[in-house]
Amino acid sequence: MSDSTTSSDHPTTVLITGANKGLGYETARRLGALGWRVLLGARDETRGAEAAHALAADGADVTFVPLDVTSDASIAAALQAVGETTDRLDVLINNAGITGEQVGPMDELTTPENTLPQHLLPVLDVNVLGPLRVTRASLPLLRAAEDPRVVMVSSGAGSLTHMTDPSRPEAQRAHLMYPTSKTALNMLTVQYANGIPDVRFNLADPGFTETDLNHHQGTQTVTEGTDAIVELATASPGPTRQYRDRHGVVPW
């Protein structure tokens, strides 16, 4: 059963990080079209407000929430603002992410030897510690919902199975930052699912989608890229501890 309908008194409420563009924006658009109440989180206040305005102009119930996933103060202020407008949060989608600085030529497998700790730390801060910070701050509102769920936006690049398969495109280029962060996010999510059974935690792999993160080189549309995110967000009742893309289960 999918949570695709809402009541006028209690629409399904979702907070999406990094939602001013790309996968986050498209997820907000699709869930808004289902009648959900969308809390659109973004670090850039101008772009976030513009994105929320565009969705609202199309009839969505959307509110912009300034939210920098690297700042405890920003997250606290965001969740306080959310709590002032709703008594619960049905779904949290941790979408905000960065790829990190490209170290070495794109066409060579030389980046690991040139990658320094200072290259890796910002990526881990956004892609791993960001979801940790936001999830922890959101737990009181999530636990007030009947079927709370968290969707972490991961990547096939976080799959050890994919990365050790020479036939997979993910294994054709070595990059210490982004894949490492997504593998860490996968483990973080599993441990959340193991330790917090009253909230469902799942991972969505968008696939190689045309977004700013890959300089619009992706082979999927942004709508296709959000299929797994929307599937896991709307599944109620649904699974926990799943790692899925739009075609099904992704191997760990």
Image (cartoon, grey):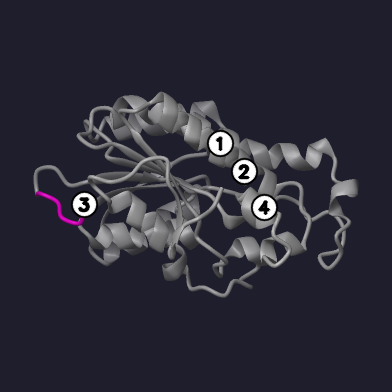
Q: Is residue 42 above or below residue 58?
A: above
Q: Which mark is residue 99?
A: 4
Tell me which label, 3 or 4, sits earlier in the chain: 3
- Distance from label 4 to label 1 (Cα)? 18 Å
Q: Position of residue 144 (x, y in %)?
A: 23, 28
Q: Which mark is residue 183?
A: 2
Q: Is residue 62 above or below residue 131?
A: below
Nearer-the-camera pick, 244 or 219: 244
- Distance from label 4 to label 2 (Cα)? 13 Å
- Asked if the residue under mark 1 is in contact with the one under mark 2, i.e. CB atoms within 8 Å, the reply is yes
Q: Position of residue 94 (x, y in %)?
A: 46, 44
Q: Amino acid at mark 3?
A: Asp
Q: Which residue occupies 53% across, 63% down?
A: 207
Q: Which mark is residue 187?
A: 1
Tell me which label, 3 or 1, sits earlier in the chain: 3
Q: Position of residue 231 (x, y in %)?
A: 34, 57
Region of the chain picked out in magenta, as a range: 1-7
Q: Amino acid at mark 1?
A: Met
